[in-house]
């Protein structure tokens, strides 16, 4: 077991973009600032996809300008293409990392961004070069790495070939996303062992969704295979509209609680993180599916909360 893992909070991007209503910018800023005081040192704060496609995140520049995070918190933005990068660079000094992305499945990529995987990767290589020219840390995300809701299983070789292309383009971190919760713990263990083996020197990140209730089990399997970097979302926000009604990313507070109980350090203060998750629940006005929001940390035994 590693002594410590890294966790990136993706709720302000992956979570907020999947909400039916647009969260007011001031409330987003308050929630992100609250997350920044939990000990989290990586937060995905905005996306620069087309505002007509994802109006929920159209205020990316305002969010970047408005948030006030401790210096040690690395602020990530998601960049779909050169135009998105041009927009994000309007706030260049307000973020530290930029993530580019593609889906491993042709059908999912086509439905998501209207291009083939090959065309997306050609664009990503140009964007990656420009990100590095800006002295920004370049990360990459591969959606549907563990299965596609349209095509079914996605071969591991297809996913790792794309990962190698990203690494060659200068991505120093590659996240593997289980976009619709199709992974299982056995496959997660095999997958991350193979990814770590094939991508020396690249930070390998696990991004699991809890669509079918296997998110934490998958995270544990990835951990035992050597993965020490994870993405998750407070309140279990996020996910994907396919399948309809599905839950989101694994909840950051559930993931942090699991690691702490196993003696693995995250740098995060769990009670303050649960407070942040309860706050986003208040803002959204509906009950979220995170377990720790309801039960609290294990060491709250006997305390009425
Ligand atoms: Zn996600």
Image (cartoon, rainbow, N blue to C red):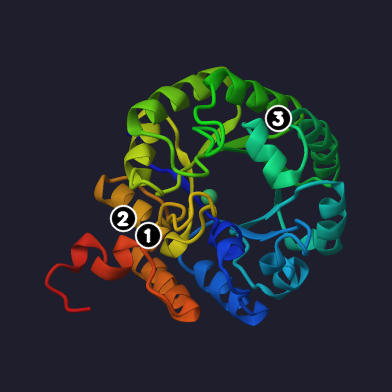
Number of marks drawn: 3
Asked whether residue 252 is in view, the answer is yes
The percent position of residue 207, horizontal first and vertical second, equals: 50, 43
Q: CA distance from mark 1 to mark 2?
A: 6 Å
The percent position of residue 124, horizontal first and vertical second, equals: 79, 37
Instruction: Report the residue marked by disc 2.
Output: 257
Instruction: Report the residue marked by disc 3.
Output: 166
Choose the circle earlier in sequence order: 3 or 2: 3
SS type, badge 1: helix
Asked whether residue 101 is in view, the answer is no
**Horizontal side, residue 15 vs residue 92: left or right:** left
Choose the circle earlier in sequence order: 1 or 3: 3
The percent position of residue 21, horizontal first and vertical second, equals: 59, 74
Classify mark 1: residues with Cα within 10 Å, few (<14), some (14-19) or many (20+).
Answer: many
Residue 253 is labelled as 1
Q: CA distance from mark 1 to mark 3?
A: 30 Å
The percent position of residue 248, horizontal first and vertical second, equals: 46, 55
SS type, badge 3: helix
The vertical placement of 215 against 225, above or below, is: below
- Residue in the picture at 36% in, 51% down: 255
Of badges 3 and 2, nearer the viewer stands 3
Q: CA distance from mark 3 to mark 2?
A: 32 Å
Is the C-beta separation of discs 1 and 2 under 8 Å?
Answer: yes
- The foreground one among 240 and 97 is 240
């Amino acid at each position: 077991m590693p002594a410590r893992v890294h966790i990136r909070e993706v709720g302000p991007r992956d979570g907020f973009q999947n909400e039916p209503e647009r969260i007011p910018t001031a409330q987003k800023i308050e929630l992100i600032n609250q997350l920044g005081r939990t000990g989290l040192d990586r937060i995905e704060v905005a996306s620069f996809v087309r505002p007509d496609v994802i109006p929920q995140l159209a205020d990316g520049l305002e969010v970047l300008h408005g948030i006030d995070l401790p210096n040690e918190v690395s602020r990530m933005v998601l960049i779909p293409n050169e135009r998105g990068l041009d927009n994000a660079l309007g706030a260049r000094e307000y973020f530290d990392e930029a993530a580019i992305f593609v889906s491993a499945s042709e059908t999912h990529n086509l439905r998501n961004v209207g291009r083939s995987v090959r065309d997306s990767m050609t664009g990503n290589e140009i964007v990656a070069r420009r990100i590095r020219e800006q002295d920004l840390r370049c990360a990459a995300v591969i959606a549907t790495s563990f299965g596609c809701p349209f095509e079914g299983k996605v071969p591991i070789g297809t996913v790792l070939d794309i990962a190698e292309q990203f690494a060659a383009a200068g991505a120093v971190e590659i996240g593997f996303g289980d976009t619709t919760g199709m992974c299982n713990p056995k496959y997660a263990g095999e997958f991350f062992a193979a990814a770590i083996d094939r991508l020396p020197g690249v930070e390998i990140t696990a991004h699991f969704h809890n669509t079918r209730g296997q998110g934490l089990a998958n995270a544990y399997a990835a951990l035992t295979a050597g993965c020490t970097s994870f993405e998750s979302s407070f309140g279990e926000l996020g996910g994907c509209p396919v399948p309809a009604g599905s839950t989101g990313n694994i909840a950051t507070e559930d993931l942090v609680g699991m690691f702490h109980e196993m003696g693995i350090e995250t740098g995060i203060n769990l009670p303050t993180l649960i407070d942040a998750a309860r706050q986003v629940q208040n803002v959204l006005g509906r009950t979220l599916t995170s377990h720790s929001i309801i039960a609290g940390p294990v060491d709250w035994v006997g305390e009425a909360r």
